[in-house]
């Protein structure tokens, strides 16, 4: 799509090889930006800085760019532009999406059915006992069906796949059950959009531009016919869903990231899947390392494993010392009081946890080399941490 | 079921309870029983996860402010996922 929302947002072409992510980055849960999304952001700061609700020329220009970008992002979610609103974060979009479903059904009740591995923001909003998951983190279908019979249920929510362990949820089956029970469904695609094909399910759909190389930006789609409304006076921006319009350069960067990612997605996912296979295999070969999540029915780019008798933060630091940037879902970090609720719900080891979220190839051209390096360094890194902790002989 | 081997890990945080339990369980023979007392909330997940990796069976009981884990040592045999 030459022209389009980039019309007037002139930028010099960027050679992605000259602006790669820092070497060894294997944590793409937020950024780094796709190089062309970054270039678009820089150009849009000049060309589309204005408030899109203003009637002056810069305002109108920003508005035109926003409309085009909204069209691109709506296409990413398979909805019409009038159904898509843009929010500061995926968390905000999730909370809002759920609030709208609940408010519209407040006469039925306020209950929310969701799995135990959903995003924290949804679990906190729901405030009820979630549906249990199995050892790989998949929602129990029978418990889901039974839960749909709860009195006073306003809505149900399910993720397409888990962003920590990668396991896909059986969304079509869960959606059918919800529809049969007359309960509207929120589908959280915030970990998967751009990485894994998206189905048509869900009255409400939420995504995050960060999952496909864009800036962190919440995308909220409400399908036509869905009963969805917010309490209080009508909000002024984003189809009555936001208090203020988004900053247009961020939306343009998100749309550019999608445009770049969409075309390359199947090939990118195939390579990522193979790299994660390598990583799962290498991790499982290290003594007393447990690899979490479904080995096959999963996101292509996410893997989590836990090393018995180690500390997650110590492992993250040891790998950082070797130039590898990974995350951890462990509670042993001094700043975190609770372990990852995902690992806890699955009943898998939560200490000594390492999480890898592969960047897109276009974001980190060296990702295969970084994964190979992690595979090679992992046994010694785990052993080093265990030796330091005095647990190597256990 | 006699419980001669008791490990008191109360007041310690992850991964210490599991490490102490593992140290105590190492010399035990299959069928022997180890009791672990721990108040770290992470242990609720990690003690069973460790036991599962090692082939031990574990039951947990809430007591006043801590959890009592009764571990029956299994045949040492590491498992993966």
Image (spheres, coloured by chain):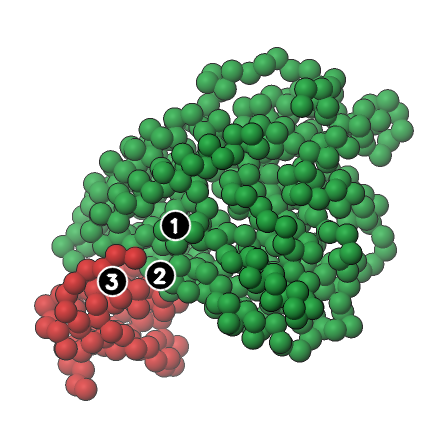
Chain colours: A green, B red
User: What residue occupies the far right of the structure in this picture?
Assistant: A55
- Residue A88 in the image, given as x and y percentages of width and height: 67, 43
Q: Residue at x 21, y 64 (%)?
A: B54
Circle 3 chain: B
Q: Nearer the viewer, residue B63 or A263?
A: A263
Task: Please tell me whether residue A312 is drawn above or below residue A249 in the rendered image.
Answer: below
Q: Does residue B18 show up?
A: no
The residue that mark 1 highlights is: A296
Disc on the earlier residue, 1 or 2: 1
- Residue A217 in the image, given as x and y percentages of width and height: 63, 40
Query: Mark 1 and 2 residues: CB-CB less than 8 Å, in contact?
Result: no
Q: Residue at x 73, y 35 (%)?
A: A71
In front of the other: label 1 or label 2? 1
Circle 1 chain: A
Q: Residue at x 74, y 42 (%)?
A: A80
- Residue A3 in the image, given as x and y percentages of width and height: 71, 19
Q: Does residue A219 show up?
A: yes
- The dot on residue B53 is 3
Circle 2 chain: A
- How far is the residue under mark 2 from the one under mark 3? 10 Å
Q: Quadrant of the C terminus of chain A?
A: bottom left
- How far is the residue under mark 3 from the one under mark 1? 21 Å
Q: Residue at x 68, y 67 (%)?
A: A183
Task: Please tell me whether residue A159 is drawn above or below residue A70 in the rendered image.
Answer: below
Query: Mark 2 and 3 residues: CB-CB less than 8 Å, in contact?
Result: no
Q: Quadrant of residue A256?
A: top right
- How far is the residue under mark 1 from the one under mark 2? 18 Å
* Residues indicated by labels 1 and 2 sit on the same polypeptide chain: yes
Q: Quadrant of the N terminus of chain A?
A: top right
- The dot on residue A261 is none
The residue that mark 2 highlights is: A348
- The local secondary structure at tag 1 comes to loop
């Amino acid at each position: 799509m030459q022209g389009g929302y980039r019309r007037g947002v002139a930028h010099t072409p960027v050679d992605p090889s000259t602006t790669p992510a820092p070497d060894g980055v294997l944590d793409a849960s937020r950024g780094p930006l796709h190089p062309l999304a970054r270039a678009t952001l820089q150009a849009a700061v000049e060309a589309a800085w204005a408030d899109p609700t203003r009637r002056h020329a810069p305002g109108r220009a920003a508005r035109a760019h926003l409309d085009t970008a909204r069209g691109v992002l709506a296409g990413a979610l398979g909805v019409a532009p009038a159904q898509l609103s843009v929010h500061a974060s995926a968390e905000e979009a999730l909370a809002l999406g759920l609030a709208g479903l609940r408010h519209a059904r407040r006469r039925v009740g306020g209950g929310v059915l969701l799995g135990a591995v959903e995003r924290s923001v949804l679990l906190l909003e729901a405030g009820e006992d979630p549906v249990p998951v199995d050892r790989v983190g998949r929602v129990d279908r029978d418990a889901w069906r039974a839960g749909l019979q709860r009195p006073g249920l306003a809505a149900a929510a399910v993720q397409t796949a888990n962003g920590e362990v990668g396991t896909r949820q059986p969304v079509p089956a869960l959606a059918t059950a919800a529809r049969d029970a007359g309960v509207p469904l929120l589908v959280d695609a915030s970990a998967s959009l751009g990485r894994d094909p998206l189905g048509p399910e869900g009255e409400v759909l939420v995504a995050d531009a960060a999952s496909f190389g864009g800036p962190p930006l919440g995308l909220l789609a409400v399908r036509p016919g869905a009963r969805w409304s917010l309490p209080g006076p009508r909000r002024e921006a984003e189809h009555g869903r936001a208090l203020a319009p988004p900053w247009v350069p961020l939306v343009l960067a998100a749309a550019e990231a999608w445009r770049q990612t969409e075309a390359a997605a199947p090939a990118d996912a195939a390579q990522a899947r193979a790299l994660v296979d390598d990583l799962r295999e290498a991790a499982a070969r290290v003594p007393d390392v447990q690899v979490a999540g479904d080995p096959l029915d999963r996101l292509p780019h996410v893997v989590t494993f836990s090393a018995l008798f180690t500390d997650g933060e110590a492992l993250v630091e040891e790998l950082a010392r070797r130039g590898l940037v990974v995350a951890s879902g462990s509670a042993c970090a001094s700043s975190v009081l609770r372990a990852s609720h995902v690992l806890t719900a699955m009943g898998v080891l939560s200490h000594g946890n390492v999480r890898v979220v592969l960047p897109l190839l276009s974001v980190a051209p060296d990702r295969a080399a970084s994964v190979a390096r992690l595979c090679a360094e992992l046994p010694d890194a785990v052993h080093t941490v265990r030796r330091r902790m005095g647990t190597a002989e256990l | 079921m006699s419980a001669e081997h008791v490990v008191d890990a109360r007041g310690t945080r992850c991964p210490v309870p599991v490490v102490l339990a593992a140290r105590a369980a190492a010399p035990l023979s299959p069928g022997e029983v180890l009791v672990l007392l721990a108040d770290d909330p992470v242990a609720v997940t990690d003690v069973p996860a460790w036991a599962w990796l090692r082939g031990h069976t574990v039951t947990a009981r809430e007591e006043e402010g801590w959890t009592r884990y009764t571990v029956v040592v299994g045949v040492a045999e590491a498992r993966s996922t």
